[in-house]
Amino acid sequence: MLDKYFDQLSVGDVFAGTRGRTVTETDIALFSAVSGDWNPLHNDAAFAAQGPFGSRIAHGLLLVSMMTGMAPISGAAVVALYGFDKVRFVHPVLLGDTITYPSKIALADVDFQICNQDGAVCVAGTIKILLHRTPAS
């Protein structure tokens, strides 16, 4: 866990990785239920087997949601999530894939990637997080 406040970070700081998170069938089913997105690419094995990826894939927004829980920033430093920019879903994540979250500081933003166990970049973008400054002594 990164225990740094806004004024302790520098442009170019790199957070090489996070703990891995394996995407499961339960994750996909629960996200489908919460979001209402029951697209057969995520939920129908026979349909998805005939599709462009050859099997079911995780929802892109499920991966982004998982990423927020994997963020290597201490909860004490975070004020709020401000938003995302330039998010692209560039490679499918299949059931059983394990994702990580390498990232680096770019100005007041964090450029992120969500990678699978083979190092393939699956989602990339910029996250904006409001952080506290170091508390006064």
Image (cartoon, rainbow, N blue to C red):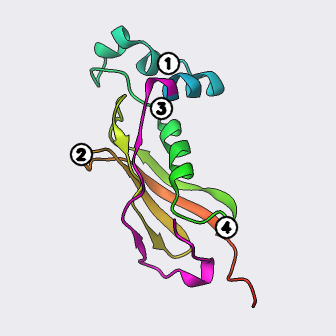
> Spatial distance from mark 2 to mark 1, Cα to Cα?
26 Å
Q: Nearer the viewer, residue 50 or 65?
A: 65
Q: Main secondary structure of the magenta part?
A: loop
> Spatial distance from mark 4 to mark 1, Cα to Cα?
33 Å
The residue identified by callout 1 is 39
Image quarter where the C terminus lies is bottom right
Which residue is located at x 46 percent, y 55 percent? 125
Q: Position of residue 2 (x, y in %)?
A: 52, 69
Q: Earlier in the sequence, mark 4 or mark 3?
A: 3
The residue identified by callout 4 is 130
Tell me, yes or no, whether the highlighted magenta stretch contains residue 17.
yes
Residue type, mark 2 in image: Asp
> Spatial distance from mark 3 to mark 1, Cα to Cα?
9 Å
Q: Which mark is residue 118?
A: 2
Q: Residues within 10 Å of mark 3 (few under 14, many from 20)?
A: many
| 4 or 1: mark nearer the eye | 4
Tell me, yes or no, whether the highlighted magenta stretch contains residue 100.
no
> Spatial distance from mark 4 to mark 3, Cα to Cα?
26 Å
> Spatial distance from mark 2 to mark 3, Cα to Cα?
19 Å
Q: Are marks 3 and 1 in contact (CB under 8 Å)?
A: yes
| 2 or 1: mark nearer the eye | 2
Q: Secondary structure at mark 3?
A: loop
Q: Secondary structure at mark 1?
A: loop
User: In the picture shown, does residue 44 fall above or below 88?
Assistant: above
